[in-house]
Amino acid sequence: MMVNVEIIFSLIAVIIALSYVTWVARNNMAWIKYVNRKPVSPSGKYTSITVVIAARNEENLIENLLQELLNQNYPPSKFQVIISNDFSTDKTADVCNAMAHKFQQSGIQFLIINAAENELSGKKAALERAIKKATGDLILTTDADCSVSPDWVASFAGKFAESSAPMITGFVKLHDGGNLFANLQAIDVLSLSGIGATTVINNKPLMCNGANLAFTKAAFSEAGGYDYGIDQPGGDDTYLMFKINQLFPGKILFNEDPKSIVTTNPQPDLKHFVRQRVRWASKVKYYKESYVKTTGVLIFTVNLVLLLAALLAAIGSLNWIIALAIWILKATADLLFLFHLSTFTSQLRLLFVFLPAQILYPFYSLAGTLIAMKKTDYEWKSRDYKNQ
């Protein structure tokens, strides 16, 4: 009887692992084919662009981003920057005001919006206030703690000139190399950004990141702004993507130009890391798209199988060779995918932490799923949020 249970578990585990490997391989092949295309540079008629940043308590970081926006290789007359100050309690507004004259000298329109006392707080409300004031046809969003290349704006303008897409997603990576904790976060975000990119390429978008996202003002308006998921404090990026994908199926594109990559910082410690991941996980259970739920189930089950296989092998109920084979099968698919992603982001050194990341990820993934399924309160930017 024990042998039969072992055989049944082994067959189920292999089927689930192969399903996961097939999904990863499909994403990997789509990535290889897509990113080898030559990016299009804007020429002739330049798209009018508004960069929108919702900022709360970013006095130590926002000046760097503003300086990088000043250094963009894009016609100043076709380029606008709007900072939406989300009730900051530090000197964020002062830092932005001090930079205003530099934008005026450069010819780039610069606007700071300070929320009134009777207005709504939160990132969605801050972004919405800014987008209403935007004069650009294409809205580019990023975060105050991010870093962009001098050709960031131009790369999205080129992609839009080529496609007229209602939404264009971009890649986000973390600064790495500081320590093991930072590198583990960086390889995790590398994987998440890669999944977001390849599922957009395959016309089944799973996720995107508002730290590097473009959409037309017309599409934003037609989608009803941030009405999709309005009862949730987070999800401004992914909820909007789902709604635009409903309105324009197959029209969302990924920006494969390496110059479009946005870099941000890892969380400084475990406490802040957990808060961030809880915030991310809190919105998952509200996704309505069936293919998103199917993919989530696949990722959950393959990680559950890995842990069960290791446990059963440890207590002698499963041949350790079978357990090891399942782990190797999944790890090989992940390694090939991460190799191509890290080549794109110039982060091949992250592969040195691939093994510890593979060991830790099943625990981390299952914990994230449990958090996503239950009511979890979290704190972010000195605000307490209640997950309904």
Image (spheres, rainbow, N blue to C red):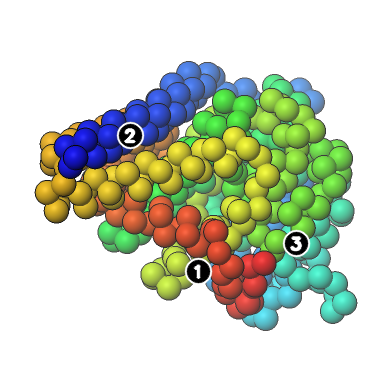
Closer to us: mark 2 or mark 3? 2
Helix, strand or loop status at disc 2:
helix
135 shown above or below 18: below
* Pointer 2 residue: 12
Amino acid, disc 2: Ile
Q: Please state, as top left, top right, bottom left or bottom right, where the C terminus lies in the image.
A: bottom right
Q: Position of residue 243 (x, y in %)?
A: 75, 41
Q: Position of residue 203 (x, y in %)?
A: 62, 27
* Pointer 1 residue: 275
166 shown above or below 59: above
* Pointer 3 residue: 231
Label 1, residues with CA under 10 Å away: few <14, some 14-19, many ≥20: some
Amino acid, disc 1: Arg
Label 3, residues with CA under 10 Å away: few <14, some 14-19, many ≥20: few
Please give left or right for residue 350 compared with residue 299 in the image. left
Q: Residue at x 69, y 25 (%)?
A: 250
Mark nearer the N terminus (1 vs 2): 2
Residue 90 visible in the picture:
yes
Q: Residue at x 77, y 58 (%)?
A: 230
Helix, strand or loop status at disc 1:
helix
Numbered mark located on residue 100 in the image: none
Please give left or right for residue 173 compared with residue 380 in the image. left
Quarter assignment of residue 350: top left
Q: Position of residue 263 (x, y in %)?
A: 49, 50
Viewer-closest of 273 and 247: 247
Give the Cα distance between marks 2 and 3. 39 Å
